[in-house]
Image (spheres, helix red, strand yellow):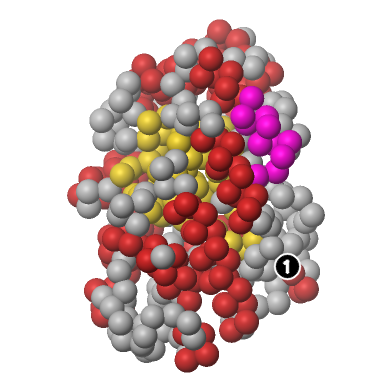
Amino acid sequence: MQTRRSALQTIILAGVAGPSLLAGFPAVAEEVKSLKAAYKDDFVVGVAMNAAQIAGKDALGDSIIRAQFNSISPENCLKWENVHPEPGRYDFVVPDQYVAFGEKNGMFILGHNLVWHSQVPDWVFHDDKGDLLTRDALLARMQDHIRTVVGRYKGRIQSWDVVNEALNDDGSLRQSLWYKIIGDDYIAKAFQYAHDADPEAQLNYNDYSLVDESKRHGAVALVTKLKEQGIPVATVGMQGHYNLDWPSAELVDATISDFAKLGVKVAVSEFDIDVLPPATSQHTADVALNIKQNPTLNPYANGLPDRVQKQLAKRYGDLFDVFVKHRDVVNRVTFWGLTDADSWKNDWPVKGRTNYPLLFDRSGQPKLAYYAVIRAARK
């Protein structure tokens, strides 16, 4: 097995996987490009950073991020409950560290996210008596938050997920408190406030399961309406929380094409591939979902079998073939976590599972899937 230092410097195939896994891949001991170098002519390749990585407490993780990626997203530090936990109090300690990391390393920096139904403190929607705010009061609160957060990083954070997961699975608008108090124009207002705070920033609508027909149609209708109103939505973030069987590469291809017709870019915004048995029949990434533990749902607690490693590698390769095909539309692919140990999929939708959804294993070594992604760039 390589030392960590050599793996980070050159990433050599030798010692990373057994001969049976390497069949069909570049020759052993061939030096392999980094992800960012492999796709430098196609799109930026990003990763979501957790609190330890942002704070410099994960030296290995930070080294891999610097070596492999040219874009970063914050996993949690810019969500409302963290950056604006109380009325009139903002906490920019971790976000400042996050932005400084990206700037020091010349990265494309994303802000995630401004308006979401989840991870928002209750006080945001209520007055001092506990009653729901009026429309005007909530709009003022939203505007203050966006103006303060986006304004602080004006010209430094290049892209913002302005509104996150505003649609139900059937494509209708989610009945969140944003919607119930303000009305359906809360989305347009959020985008306008973000644009006013930083006119040069790329503004995104971000959601999961957009490959599903009903939800995709809802997203197409939403973006079309926003653009007709002159709202500056530049990119649709297709959250790529996929599994080994769903969605098909053809469906991902068709979905990107549908959004391209709207004149917007597409970001594969939260990419990971779940290798465990599905815990639900729903195609969802709803963070509120919590399913009871069951040993049959955690079959690889002691390691991922070679056959599944191969499945995962092929799956990543097939999907990156689609992204490269649409490189005129796809402007970013961001992995939601760095190593398998960092992934939210270990605890969602079933807590305590052992999942393997990313390109780097729990020790920070590149997996077979990593080489499949590199190979897709060489075709």
**Who's the residue at 56% across and 46% down the image?**
239
Q: Where is residue 255 in the image (x, y as percent from the top left)?
A: 60, 42
Residue position for label 1: 277
As drawn, the residue found furthest toward the bottom would be: 19
* 358 vs 336: above or below: below
Identify which amino acid the numbered label 1 is placed on. Answer: Pro
* 39 vs 369: above or below: above
**Who's the residue at 61% across and 56% down the image?**
249
Dividing the picture into quadrants, the one containing residue 39 is: bottom left
What span is colored magenta in the figure?
Answer: 211-221
Identify the image quadrant of the N terminus: bottom left
Front-lying residue, 269 or 30: 30
Front-lying residue, 266 or 192: 266
Q: Is residue 360 visible?
A: no
Q: Where is residue 76 in the image (x, y as percent from the top left)?
A: 47, 45
Identify the image quadrant of the C terminus: bottom left
The rendered magenta stretch, by its main secondary structure, is classed as helix
Q: Is residue 373 visible?
A: yes
Q: Position of residue 323 (x, y in %)?
A: 48, 52
Q: Is residue 217 magenta?
A: yes
Dividing the picture into quadrants, the one containing residue 160 is: top left
As drawn, the residue found furthest toward the left would be: 104
**Who's the residue at 69% across and 18% down the image?**
180
Q: Does the magenta stretch include residue 30?
A: no
**Element marked by disc 1:** loop
Q: Is residue 279 left or right of residue 53?
A: right
Q: Where is residue 117 in the image (x, y as percent from the top left)?
A: 61, 32
**Who's the residue at 57% across and 22% down the image?**
224
Q: How crowded is mark 1: few (under 14 residues within 10 Å), some or many (20 or more)?
A: few
